[in-house]
């Protein structure tokens, strides 16, 4: 019986591998098609009003989304019973298919007769973002890390999320509207004269973020009662989600402050493009964190990563603030003392030298502050060990040393019991050893 179960399990893993990796290869093929279609688009005249990404680097940045199907295939092939791998595979396929359809439609409309049914492809691509976003934002958080719901009480949310995803996709596909990347062409599948359809689509699109928030709440509750490896796994995805949320908040805020600027377009501000790249790159943290957590690769490194991220993130914000503040103050003082209006070189030099001098002191100060605030037990243990090392250099009484060692172990490791065994002296010790 046991041998039969092992054969069935191996057969299931082999079947999953046979299906998972071809799906990942299909995603790679779709991205290759994007590259070809992008080259064709650059050979035709596309109006600027179509809002098409014409930057090569911006296009290649979309290749970062290949991490979704690749990590999904890796998880699905090793843990075929965990649906998270398959969700990532489906999500990656949707992103790659959407990008290929986008370029296909633009090329077909810009060059009439070059490819068949470009408007129909554009209409299909118009709603693919809904399941692509919804799958990641609901079911990954709801099922992480073991592929099962936290409890039976969360079944209604899983069912409602699936229904909302389906109805929101249908609503976006059939609602009247224009396609922004095709010069405002009408949706070919729109149903005119049915305002209730548009209102229903808005309702389901508003329900989708609510389902995502509740899925995140389920993960928080799961974390509160988790222990050991599961707790470390949830830390990984929580860290990735925090990074993504922060980067997208910054990117969206700058887009709101500079509404006339477009990302990845010729002549756009370099730092806006940098923020957009950071947001895209940060989005890939989620599948990477899911892969590390489920495959348990360097699982317990997450605490160190979080610590370093907080420290160097705070350090970067502090130094940038000091730099620009130093530039403004230096320019103001120079104008006050000399009467000249501009002296940017002096301000930049002074601010750069100040940052170079403050880098290490600030880093140590912030590290100490973070350790005291968020890693208090580790910080206290390090202080105890540091004090013990200082006493150890001068201690000669073995009885006192034994008591110090046991006290340090009790204070830092906090075991239920602690004892110390000292090897008795032998004839080869030449009289040197412990007398017990």
Image (tube, rainbow, N blue to C red):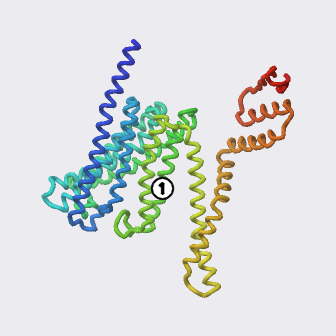
Q: Position of residue 248 (x, y in %)?
A: 45, 56
Q: Nearer the viewer, residue 180 or 269?
A: 269
Please rate how many residues cluster around mark 1, counting C-alpha atoms within 10 Å: few if below 14, some from 14 to 19, many from 20: many
The picture quadrant where one finds residue 316 is: bottom right
Q: Position of residue 325 (x, y in %)?
A: 60, 70
Q: Residue at x 33, y 31 (%)?
A: 17
Q: Residue at x 74, y 40 (%)?
A: 385
Q: Residue at x 61, y 76 (%)?
A: 330
Q: Disc 1 marks which residue?
A: 247
* Above or below: residue 262 compared with residue 296: below
Q: Where, quadrant-wise, is the C terminus in this rendering?
A: top right
Q: Position of residue 209 (x, y in %)?
A: 42, 49
Local secondary structure at mark 1: helix
The picture quadrant where one finds residue 163 is: top left
Q: Position of residue 110 (x, y in %)?
A: 19, 62
Q: Nearer the viewer, residue 198 or 366?
A: 366
Taking the image as drawn, is residue 404 in sight?
yes
* Above or below: residue 296 compared with residue 49: above
Q: Nearer the viewer, residue 8 or 433?
A: 433
Residue at the extreme left: 113
* Above or below: residue 431 compared with residue 332: above
Q: Is 424 positioned to the left or the right of 180 in the image?
A: right
Taking the image as drawn, is residue 196 in sight?
no
């Amino acid at each position: 019986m046991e041998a039969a179960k092992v054969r069935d399990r191996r057969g299931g893993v082999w079947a999953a591998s046979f299906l998972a990796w071809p799906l990942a290869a299909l995603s790679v093929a779709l991205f290759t098609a994007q590259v070809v279609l992008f080259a064709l688009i650059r050979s035709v005249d596309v109006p600027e009003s179509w809002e098409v990404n014409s930057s090569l680097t911006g296009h290649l940045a979309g290749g970062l989304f290949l991490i979704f199907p690749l990590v999904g295939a890796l998880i699905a092939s090793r843990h075929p019973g965990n649906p998270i791998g398959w969700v990532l595979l489906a999500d990656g396929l949707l992103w790659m298919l959407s990008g290929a359809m986008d370029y296909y439609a633009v090329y077909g409309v810009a060059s009439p007769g070059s490819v068949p049914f470009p408007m129909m492809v554009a209409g299909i691509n118009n709603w693919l973002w809904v399941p692509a976003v919804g799958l990641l934002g609901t079911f990954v958080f709801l099922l992480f890390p073991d592929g099962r719901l936290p409890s039976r009480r969360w079944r209604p949310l899983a069912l409602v999320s699936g229904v909302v995803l389906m109805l929101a996709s249908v609503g976006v596909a059939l609602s009247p509207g224009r396609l922004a990347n095709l010069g405002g062409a009408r949706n070919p599948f729109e149903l005119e004269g049915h305002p209730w359809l548009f209102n229903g689509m808005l309702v389901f699109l508003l329900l989708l973020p609510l389902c995502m928030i509740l899925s995140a709440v389920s993960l928080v509750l799961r974390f509160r009662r988790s222990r050991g490896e599961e707790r470390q796994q949830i830390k990984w995805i929580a860290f990735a989600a925090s990074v993504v949320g922060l980067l997208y908040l910054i990117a969206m805020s700058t887009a709101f402050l500079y509404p006339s600027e477009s990302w990845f377009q010729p002549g756009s501000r370099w730092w806006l493009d940098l923020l957009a790249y950071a947001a895209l790159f940060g989005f890939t943290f989620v599948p990477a964190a899911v892969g590390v957590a489920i495959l348990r690769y360097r699982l317990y490194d997450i605490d160190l990563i979080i610590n370093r991220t907080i420290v160097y993130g705070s350090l970067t914000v502090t130094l940038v603030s000091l730099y620009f503040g130093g530039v403004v103050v230096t320019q103001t003082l120079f104008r006050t003392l000399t009467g000249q209006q501009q002296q940017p070189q002096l301000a930049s030099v002074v601010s750069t030298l100040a940052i170079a001098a403050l880098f290490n002191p600030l880093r140590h100060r912030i590290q100490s502050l973070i350790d005291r605030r968020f890693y208090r037990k580790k910080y206290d243990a390090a202080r105890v060990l540091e004090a013990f090392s200082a006493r150890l250099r001068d201690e000669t009484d073995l009885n006192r040393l034994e008591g110090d060692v046991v006290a340090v172990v009790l204070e830092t490791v906090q075991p239920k019991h602690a004892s110390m065994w000292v090897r008795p002296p032998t004839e080869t010790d030449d009289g040197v050893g412990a007398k017990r």
